[in-house]
Image (tube, grey):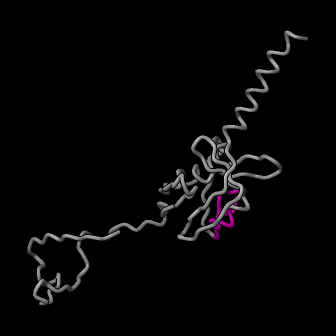
């Protein structure tokens, strides 16, 4: 009996370590510029697991047999990697939102102190430049005289921009 005890203790340590790796937190998800409070969420090994109900509430996406969908837009989940995106625990289905962001080439910013994740535009939402020609605009010079960009067509122009944010 005593010989089996160390194996049992080792198993108990392994199980408790796996639970310790998953950290249940209260999180804020900003998706499509809308903030949603999520409680609980699991932060595990640099991943963000939320319930599928919270996925729908925060992003408008639903998990369906064909993939992760919102209206007519659907992103199939790779079958060989399904465990990276979905899991069942405590009677709930959980979804890895950071793995999904990586799948759809969506940038994510994370503030650890505030437990806040900001999700930028997915690759399908980003606009590409149709040309390298800047749109026309008119601005005053230091003396207040107005100048339009079209006045300088055919000439080399160096534009300097600045923003306070």
Between 92 and 43, the one nearer to me in the picture: 43
Q: Looking at this rendering, what residue extends furthest in the bottom direction?
A: 145
x%, y% of residue 107? Answer: 47, 56
Quadrant of residue 164 in the image? Answer: bottom left
Looking at the image, residue 99 sits to the left or right of residue 129; the answer is right
Residue at 8%, 74% (x, y): give it: 155
Looking at the image, residue 70 sits to the left or right of residue 142; the answer is right
Between 51 and 117, the one nearer to me in the picture: 117
Q: Which quadrant of the rendered structure holds the C terminus? A: bottom left
x%, y% of residue 157? Answer: 12, 72
Residue at 76%, 52% (x, y): give it: 93
Q: How many marks?
A: 0
Between 160 and 20, the one nearer to me in the picture: 20
Q: Is residue 39 magenta?
A: no
Above or below, comparing residue 21 to residue 71 in the picture: above
| Residue extent of the magenta highlight | 55-71
Residue at 18%, 71% (x, y): give it: 159
Q: Looking at this rendering, what residue extends furthest in the front direction?
A: 113
Looking at the image, residue 24 sits to the left or right of residue 113; the answer is right
Between 164 and 49, the one nearer to me in the picture: 164
Q: Looking at this rendering, what residue extends furthest in the top direction?
A: 3
Q: Is residue 56 magenta?
A: yes
Above or below, comparing residue 130 to residue 84 in the picture: below
Q: Which quadrant of the rendered structure holds the N terminus? A: top right
Quadrant of residue 139 in the image? Answer: bottom left
x%, y% of residue 104? Answer: 53, 55
x%, y% of residue 7? Answer: 80, 17
Residue at 52%, 61% (x, y): give it: 118
């Amino acid at each position: 009996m005593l010989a089996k005890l160390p194996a049992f203790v080792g198993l108990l340590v392994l199980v408790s370590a796996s639970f310790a790796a998953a950290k249940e937190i209260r999180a804020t998800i900003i998706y499509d510029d809308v903030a949603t409070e999520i409680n609980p969420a699991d932060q595990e090994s640099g991943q963000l697991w939320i319930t599928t109900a919270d996925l729908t509430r925060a992003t408008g996406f639903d998990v369906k047999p064909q993939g992760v969908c919102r209206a007519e837009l659907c992103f199939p989940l790779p079958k060989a990697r399904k465990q990276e995106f979905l899991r069942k625990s405590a009677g709930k289905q959980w979804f890895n939102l950071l793995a999904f962001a990586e799948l759809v080439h969506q940038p994510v910013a994370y503030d650890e102190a505030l437990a806040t994740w900001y999700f930028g535009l997915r690759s399908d939402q980003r606009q590409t430049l149709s040309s390298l020609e800047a749109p026309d605009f008119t601005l005053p010079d230091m003396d207040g005289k107005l100048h339009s960009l079209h006045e300088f067509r055919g000439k080399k122009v160096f534009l300097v921009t600045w923003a306070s944010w």
